[in-house]
């Protein structure tokens, strides 16, 4: 595997102080705002959002384009910093962290899954999953074992030496999920993870997310524009014009594994076989 150009930080890392305390909410945002400056014009992308998410919750984030949901996810993922308000992650105000510390939090504490998979095309599935381990300085001898375990967790034990071009869309997304899981994060942020997948594969991915949430106690935040996908979560939040306008539990959460079993197989679809 070719090493990325930048080297992992040698600074010691400690997870936010409240990560081991179930009494501390995993996410607390208060009056959170984000304003972008474009020339002389200020564009408010997020306007005073207040929200709390406890560990082990599975939350869907919905809203039209320009509603602020992607900005919100970027702030939660420490990919951006708020213009105002507070963001406590496991009890610590991460908005005060410098760029190096935020990068460490992203690597060790948060997993990311995106619509476009974002796999390195010239490296195998196994090597793609190893990338986060390189950046946090995991010894070479440990990386392969951890990556193989993550691939096994998403059902791709036998696909480690395949390149992304040799995998279906569903399999590529599973590799991306394995990469997000390899550092054992406390929080998984998924931005339109089913946007490039057919209906059957989308339900299969949601069954995987539900299993991870149920068996691992993994906290999941899922951005989606698909209302039927949102109903696999336990709670739905809705953004509009940069504001949180709805936050409600899901009545009658759909069971993705059950829905998948009821769907007829179609060999022409981009499945996971």
Image: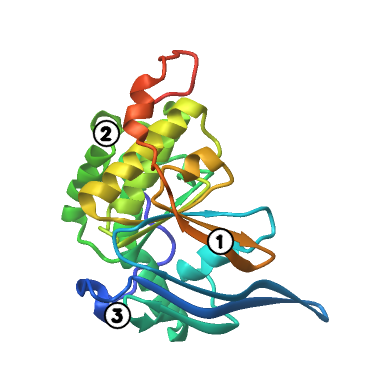
Q: Nearer the viewer, residue 210 or 271?
A: 210
Where residue 107 sits: x, y (%)?
Answer: 35, 65
The x and y percentages for residue 142 are 17, 54
Query: Which image quarter is the C terminus in?
Result: top left
Q: Residue 170, position in %: x, y? A: 43, 32
Where on the picture, by quarter, is residue 217? Answer: bottom left
N-term-proximal mark, 3 vs 2: 3
Residue furthest out toward the front: 251
Residue at image position (21%, 47%) is 215
Q: What numbered label is drawn on residue 155?
A: 2
Mark 3 crowdedness (10 Å alpha carbons): few <14, some 14-19, many ≥20: few
Q: Which residue is mark 1?
A: 246
Which residue is tagged 3? 11
Q: Are marks 3 and 1 in contact (CB under 8 Å)?
A: no
Closer to the camera: disc 2 or disc 1? 1
Q: Earlier in the sequence, mark 3 or mark 1?
A: 3
Residue 14 visible in the picture: no
- Mark 3 to mark 1: distance in Å? 41 Å
Q: CA distance from mark 2 to mark 1?
A: 35 Å
Residue 117, percent from left and from top: 48, 43
Q: Secondary structure at mark 3?
A: loop
């Amino acid at each position: 595997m070719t090493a990325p150009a930048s080297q992992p930080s040698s600074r010691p890392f400690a997870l936010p102080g409240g990560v081991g305390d179930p009494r501390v909410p995993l996410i607390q945002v208060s009056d959170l705002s984000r304003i972008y400056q474009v020339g002389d014009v200020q564009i408010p992308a997020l306007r005073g959002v207040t929200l709390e998410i406890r560990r082990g919750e599975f939350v869907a984030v919905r809203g039209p384009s320009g509603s602020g949901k992607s900005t919100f996810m970027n702030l939660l993922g420490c990919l951006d910093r708020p213009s105002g308000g507070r963001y406590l992650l496991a009890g610590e105000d991460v908005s005060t962290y410098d760029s190096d510390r935020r990068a460490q939090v992203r690597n060790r504490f948060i997993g990311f899954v995106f619509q476009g998979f974002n796999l390195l095309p010239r490296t195998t599935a196994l090597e793609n999953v190893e990338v986060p381990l390189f950046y946090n300085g995991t010894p070479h001898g440990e990386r392969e074992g951890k990556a193989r375990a993550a691939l096994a967790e998403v059902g791709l034990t036998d696909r480690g030496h395949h390149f992304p071009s040799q995998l279906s869309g569903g399999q590529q997304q599973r590799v991306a999920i394995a990469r997000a899981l390899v550092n054992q994060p406390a929080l998984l942020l998924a931005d339109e993870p089913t946007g490039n997948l057919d209906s059957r594969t989308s339900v299969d991915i949601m069954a995987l997310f539900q299993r991870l949430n149920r068996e691992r106690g993994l906290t999941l935040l899922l951005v989606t524009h698909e209302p039927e996908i949102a109903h696999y979560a336990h709670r739905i939040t809705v953004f509009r014009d940069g504001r949180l306008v709805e936050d409600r539990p899901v009545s009658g959460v759909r069971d993705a594994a059950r829905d998948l079993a009821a769907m007829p197989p179609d060999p022409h679809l981009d499945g996971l076989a």
